[in-house]
Amino acid sequence: MVHLKHKSLFNWSGGKDSSLCLYHSLRDERFDIQYLLTTINGKNKRISMHGVSEDLLDDQAKSIGMPLRKLHLPETPTMSEYEVIVSKELEEAKSQDITISIFGDIFLEDLRAYREKQLEKKGFTAMFPLWKRNTVDIAQEFIELGFKAIIVSVDGRYLDQSFAGRYYDQSFIDDLPDNVDPCGENGEFHSFVFDGPIFEYPVQFKQGEIIYKEYKADDKSGKDVGFWYCDLLKN
């Protein structure tokens, strides 16, 4: 039986879940992935939430061998600003007959519902290849496939400074507190993947300093949120 591949875009964060999702998506006969799409903080030229420089993102895409498109966002965009920028990108994608948007989300129901609703407005289908998989199994598969990643940011509410800059391996997973998901799916930590089966060669970098940043609370707690970032420098 011949299966028709659908032109798709892949939402790329540069992290481990995104990498494992891309690994499976490239092998999925339903998808013809046209490019990677990444949101960038337009002020500091870094991947949103992860804090990785745009230069290293470019190096990732080159090693993967896929085109990369970037959405440059304001430093602290409102939801309406974000949706306008994304809407324009989707309209451009639709003009290229792209109808599927792929995400590496695992179990955040609200986020999935939001993505599906916004994409449906533009005639797109959202796909989640890792959805509802056990995160312990996902973490093990990532390591066993030979992916290599470094932790680039941690949420200070869950983890201390010592976790920033560590490599994502069994030792790291074993040291996580019981309330932290092994894939960091609740935003407890973020990673940068620099080698593995989707890469033609390792992405070169060197570790910089560990930086602490606080952000104004966006919930009812009223408490500012602090993150530890491990800066990665282009080698």
Image (tube, rainbow, N blue to C red):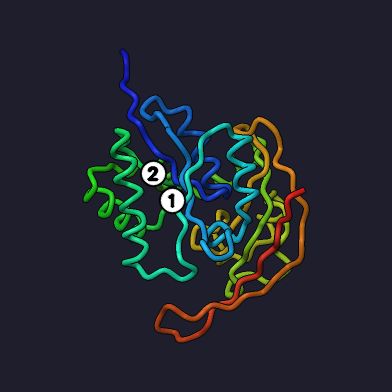
Quarter-wise, where is residue 182 in the image? Answer: bottom right
Q: In the rendered image, which residue does mark 2 sit on?
A: 128
Q: Is residue 11 left or right of residue 234?
A: left
- Crowding at label 2, few (<14), some or many (≥20) Cα neighbours within 10 Å? some
Question: Which quadrant of the rendered structure holds the N terminus?
Answer: top left
Reading the chain from its start, which is encountered first: label 2 or label 1?
1
126 to 221, vertically: above or below: above
Relative to the observer, which residue lies in front, 235 or 12?
235
- Give the residue drawn at x 34%, y 40%: 93
Q: Position of residue 111 (x, y in %)?
A: 36, 58
- Crowding at label 1, few (<14), some or many (≥20) Cα neighbours within 10 Å? some
**Residue 48 - label:** none
Q: Position of residue 188 (x, y in %)?
A: 56, 64
Marks 2 and 1, how far apart in space?
6 Å
106 to 111, vertically: above or below: above
Q: Position of residue 22 (x, y in %)?
A: 50, 38
Q: In terms of secondary structure, where does tag 2 sit?
A: loop
- Give the residue drawn at x 51%, y 61%: 42
- What type is the residue that disc 1 sits on? Asp
Quarter-wise, where is residue 232 in the image? Answer: bottom right
Q: In the rendered image, which residue does mark 1 sit on?
A: 105
Q: Are marks 2 and 1 in contact (CB under 8 Å)?
A: yes
- What type is the residue that disc 2 sits on? Phe
195 to 54, vertically: above or below: above
Q: Position of residue 118 (x, y in %)?
A: 27, 54
